[in-house]
Structures are given as C-alpha cells and as structure tokens.
Amino acid sequence: MALQPAGTNPVPVKIDSVSDVSCPWCVIGLKSLEQALQRLDGKVAAEIHFQPFELNPEMPPEGQGNDEYLQQKYGSVPEQFAKNREAIRARCEALGFDFRKRERIYNTHDAHRLLHWAGLEGRQSALKHALFGAYFTDGDDISAHEVLIRVAGDVGLSPVRAREILSSDIYAVDVRAQERFYVEHGIRGVPAVIVNERHLISGGQPVEVFESALKQIAGLE
C-alpha cells in the first residue's frame, strides 16, 4: 500500500509491517501507524508491505477457545482476561476500530497466503483491514476457506482465484520463507514495524510514538 501525501518532495520511506491477523495489538499498531502517517501528510511518502508472522502456527483447524488458549500460554486468570480485553477495546475505540470479544483462536496460515497474493494484486492493505474486521469485529473463523474467499471478494479480489489458491499450496513456500527471514533477524513478537529495513518500532505504540520515530528517520526533526 502506498500512502502518497500531497505537497512537494515528500521523503520516501519503506515500511515492512510484520504482524498476524489474529493479533489484537497488531490492529492497534497498524491503526496508530496509519494515523501517524496522516499527521505527516505532505512530508512522508510511505510504502507499506505486510509481512507474515504466525503466533500459533501449530493451531489445529478447529482452533481453540480464546480463554483456554490465553490460560495455557500466559497462565492468566479470567479476571485478567477481562481487564486486558477492556484495555484493548478502549485503545481500538480511540483509533476508530470496533473490537469485540472473540470466542476462538484460529490458524492464520491460509490468511497469510491470501495476503501474499493480495500484495501481488495491489490489494494487500484492503485485505489486511478486512481480515482484521472479519475476526475482531465480526468474530468470523478466519481459517475457514469460505470466509477467506468471501472477504477476498469483498475487497475486489477474484473469489475464483482465491478458491484456487486455498485449495492448493500456492504461496505457502513464500510465506514460510518470509516468516523464517524475520525470525532469523530477531523478530519474536508482533507487531514489528521496520522502516527502511533498518529501524524497528516494536509493539502497539501510540500514534505519537510512530509520528516521532518517522520524523526522526525521515530527517524531519
């Protein structure tokens, strides 16, 4: 996705956004990044590429209950689940995203294969946002092929081609290779925003943090 600002001689920046579509902090990070870029309109021309990261690559097709998963992974208790969800909901609301409680965690490998394809078709940002909405707002099973095909069609991608990709292993090698690349370069958690292949901004940072970092990287302050 290219956000081309108005004005003269904007500073070009390349952004690789490493994230998973089942990660709520990745929603916060993306929305914050986009709003920071809007604040810098006329000064920075950003080209965003969404890179794959699977938080749960071994998740079975049927998924796992959200609370059960959180308890197993983090050892949290239900009261902490509720507190964390409310914090995430409030952050999302402030950024204009409708975050609701999810019942299950799903495998996201096929979603990343479609995102890889969408990047080739110039529709990656649209699909990324649509997948976030399908999962975190609508509670859809984003591992289900029919859901993925529908969401792809909703953003202008070919449902026929989406079905062909999902019924095969197309782009699986590409996705796995990109995942390995970022893990081998030290990415252990997401979101991870890498600017100009050198500067790392980790986590779901506030808009102001992204804005300040981008200004410094672009030499605007």
Image: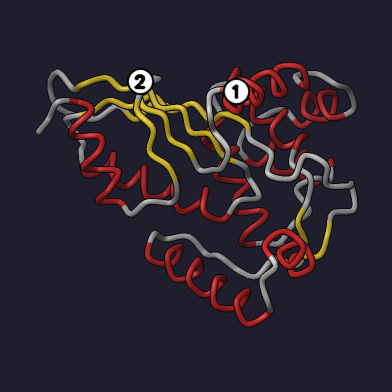
**Amino acid at circle 1:** Glu
Report which quarter residue 70 is drawn in.
bottom right
Q: Quadrant of the C terminus?
A: top left
**Amino acid at circle 2:** Asn
Relative to 49, is 29 above or below? below
The residue singled out by tag 1 in the image is: 184
Identity of the residue drawn at 53% across and 29% down: 186
Q: Residues within 10 Å of mark 1 (few under 14, many from 20)?
A: few
The residue singled out by tag 2 in the image is: 196
Q: Is residue 47 left or right of residue 107?
A: left
Nearer the N terminus, badge 1 or badge 2?
Answer: 1
Q: Secondary structure at mark 1?
A: helix
* Camera-side residue of 19 and 139: 19
Q: Residues within 10 Å of mark 2 (few under 14, many from 20)?
A: some
Relative to 108, is 49 above or below? above
Residue 83: give its label. none
Q: Position of residue 47 (x, y in %)?
A: 38, 24
Dots 1 and 2: beta carbons under 8 Å? no
Residue farthest along the bottom direction in this orientation: 79
Q: Position of residue 178 (x, y in %)?
A: 63, 21
Identity of the residue drawn at 69% across and 33% down: 112
Q: Secondary structure at mark 2?
A: loop
Identity of the residue drawn at 75% across and 65% down: 66
Q: In the rendered picture of this protein, how many numbered marks are placed on residues?
A: 2
Q: Is residue 144 left or right of residue 111?
A: right
Q: Position of residue 205 (x, y in %)?
A: 37, 51
Q: Is residue 68 left or right of residue 40?
A: right
Q: Quadrant of the N terminus?
A: top left
